[in-house]
Amino acid sequence: MARIYNDSVTAALSSDISTDREVEEPIAVQTEVDSDTAAFEQACKIIPNGVQTESKRPDRHVEGVYPKYIEKGKGAYVWDYSGHSYIDYPCALGAILVGYSNTAVNKAVHSTIEKGNLFSLPNKSESVLSEKLCELIPSCEMVRLLKTGSEAVSAAIRIARAVTGNEGVVFCGYNGWHDAYAVTTSKKKGIPKGMRRYSGQFKYNNRDDLTDFFSLGKHVEFPIAAVVMEPYVFEEPKEGYLEAVKDLAHSNNALLVFDEVVTAFRTKEYSAQKYFGVIPDLTCLGKAMGNGYPISAVGGKAEYMKQLTGDCFVSSTYGGDLIGISAAIATLKVMEESNGLKRIWKSGQRLKDDFNALSAEHGLRAHVQCIGLPSRTKFMFKNEAQAGLFWQECLRMGVLFGYAQFTTLSHGKDEMDITYEAMAVAMKKVAEHFDEPERALDGKVPSATFRLVR
């Protein structure tokens, strides 16, 4: 694979542009590409699809061009097993907030490991993190710590059902792999068919579509307990939309649940609910909160969360795991001390502006553009082959893209400059092969996960 910017990458790694610059030299070649392919083929024999997360499957990228594996990461960079480094923008599907292997976060985790991470009684760190979440997230007066986003959403649904006495749930956005949500998607095999009577999906920014769900029998056969939604994905809410959703939920004895597993801690004000000024009844948190360490939470008004003190059962042995808790405390401290939200927003805005300027320069803006708030963006092309060609050419120049882009504290000016140069070359290539991008692809056309194509 041709590489052009190795010298620039080395310079960027040594510059003081982030909160964490203790970067090791790229590793020596350990595994050849052919060996990686063989290793992945063997992995598929013992791991379904060879991955733990569907979005990491090779066919989600340019298979045959992208590395099969990532060996390590530091700051804004990741390395494959052949020692090639890449500026990374998927950021572990949005889980990395301050940069890979951040020193401050690592120190907190190492300290926890030395003392022990799980005990027979609670630890005071659980309260420290819970208090911080209640301070940052307006809807949170009490929280329950968990491990994954799907757990948090499942818990929120159970709480809402306990509060309202209703059983139906409607969703908007991506809300995990649990039965209540997954039964509304194409990935529903293995879920009792009767579950479909309880769940539905409504369209974003469409008030009438949600209203229809409160007409029993039309979509969902049981009164709605919870309206569960990502407050935004790539499209911003229309004026008054989120307020209307909240009013509609409350007027029908349902709770509003914001799934902020992706949006929290990246959006200005630390949450979409504070940024847009609409406070839900319950909130689901996760991903970036732990900078890659597993942790999530469900939180909300005390009157609702107190259902967990009675017969509404949400209990997890690893909810009190102190590795994720200490990582989250350290991550949020780094963000606050480094003015992290402003920096992440700035780099995300530059990525969006640079992409759109290059698209316009080549006369492609009608079909090729970057959409979304700076905290989470997406490159829109006319088809998947064009997207794959763009990704392929950027990868060759040391920049790794995926279906959604994020930035971290470690994406500083040098990284953004390198990224611009890579995108400029890649956009030119897309323009040259706009009508037949497959002819310039050296690998297979990528395919989106169901959450983006349904």
Image (cartoon, grey):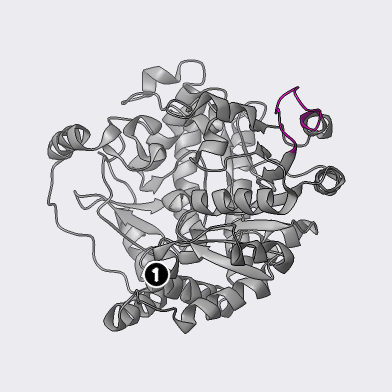
SS at circle 1: loop
Q: Magenta stretch containing residue 158, yes or no?
A: no
Q: Residue at x 30, y 83 (%)?
A: 115
Residue indicated by mark 1 = 321
Q: Residue 121, position in %: x, y?
A: 41, 79
| Dominant SS in magenta | loop
Residue 72 lies in quadrant? bottom left
Task: Choose between 33 and 170: the one closer to the eye.
Answer: 170
Q: Nearer the viewer, residue 166 or 346?
A: 166
Please check the rendered image and state whether residue 220 is part of the magenta-colored stretch, yes or no: yes
Visible residue check, residue 151: yes
29 relative position to 213: left or right: left
Residue 246, position in %: x, y?
81, 48
Residue 77 image-quadrant placement? bottom left
Up-down relation of residue 262 to residue 104 (above or below): above
- Can residue 381 be seen from the camera position used here? no
**Residue 381 at x, y = what percent?**
56, 28
Which residue is drawn at the image coordinates 35% and 29% (left, top)? 59
Residue segment shown in magenta: 212-223
Q: Quadrant of the N terminus?
A: top left
Direction from residue 28 to residue 108 in the image, left or right: right
Tell me which residue sits at (70%, 45%) in the image: 226
Residue located 33% across and 41% down the image: 396
Q: Is residue 151 left or right of residue 134?
A: left
